[in-house]
Amino acid sequence: MADPPRYNIAPGQEVITLTADGVQHMRWGMIPVGRVNARGRPVMETIVNARSETVFDKSAFTDVKRAVVPVEGWYEWTGEKRRKQPWRISRKDGELLYFAAIYDIWHGPGGIEVSQVATITCAPSADVRDIHHRMGVILNPDQLDLWFSGDEETAKSLMCPYPDGTLHVEKADDVDWDGA
């Protein structure tokens, strides 16, 4: 059975994720494996996005694997609290977007194992710049194998803004946020 369509996916919800091993559902948001605070206790904050500039340098992401989160589009919000304007962003040609991501398995108390994923962000393209200061790293279908299995330098070369003029940005006033 296919997943039902959803307009908005919040951190903590499951998302369809592609890995070198296939398709699976993962929790969006990572509890960093092995990260501890000054008292030596585990840090339990959830990281939903990792910055492309530092993802390979941060100890919170040691030993993570690469993944891709396919989407039809995403939403950004601008404006003041309680008066925010939603914006729908998708490819101009209507094809899927493939967000670069990292994933691992969180091992919790009592033997709990949770597959978890965080998307990777970069500076925005000109298409997105007016509504947000960051955007997800978007890969083309022909780059997925390189993302999954390329070395770190190859992966770094793929983490850049999507080409200007290829995304469609529109006001999303017509969305029934509770209906899907």
Image (cartoon, rainbow, N blue to C red):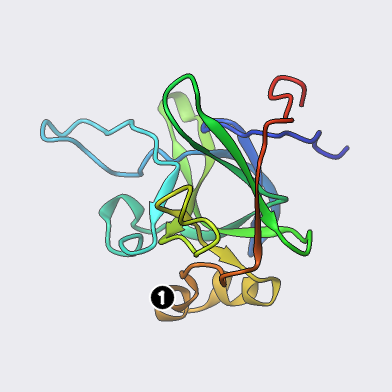
Tell me residue 59's x, y (percent): 26, 54
The furthest residue to the right: 1
Is 18 placed above or below 156 here?
Answer: above
**What quarter of the picture does the C terminus occupy?**
top right
For the point 45% across and 42% down, the residue is 48
Q: Using the image as rendered, state which of residue 79 and residue 40 is in the foreground.
A: 79
Q: Where is residue 14 in the image (x, y as percent from the top left)?
A: 63, 35
Q: Is residue 148 left or right of residue 30?
A: right
Image position of 88 with respect to 159: above or below: above
Horizontal and vertical percent for residue 76? 54, 41
Name the amino acid, label 1: Glu
Q: In which quarter of the image is the N terminus?
A: top right
Q: How crowded is the residue under tag 1: few (<14 C-alpha within 10 Å), some, or many (20+)?
A: few
Residue 157 placement: quadrant = bottom left
Q: Name the side, left or right, on which 61 lies relative to 144.
A: left
How many numbered marks are there?
A: 1
- Residue marked by disc 1: 152
In the shown orientation, is residue 36 left or right of residue 162?
Answer: left
Q: Is residue 176 or residue 106 the one in the foreground?
A: 176
In this view, 116 is above or below 162: above
Mark 1 lies on a secondary structure that is helix
Residue under the image location 49 percent in, 67 percent down: 161
Residue pictured at 45% horizontal, 32% vertical: 79
Residue 13 versus residue 134: which sits nearer the camera? Answer: 134
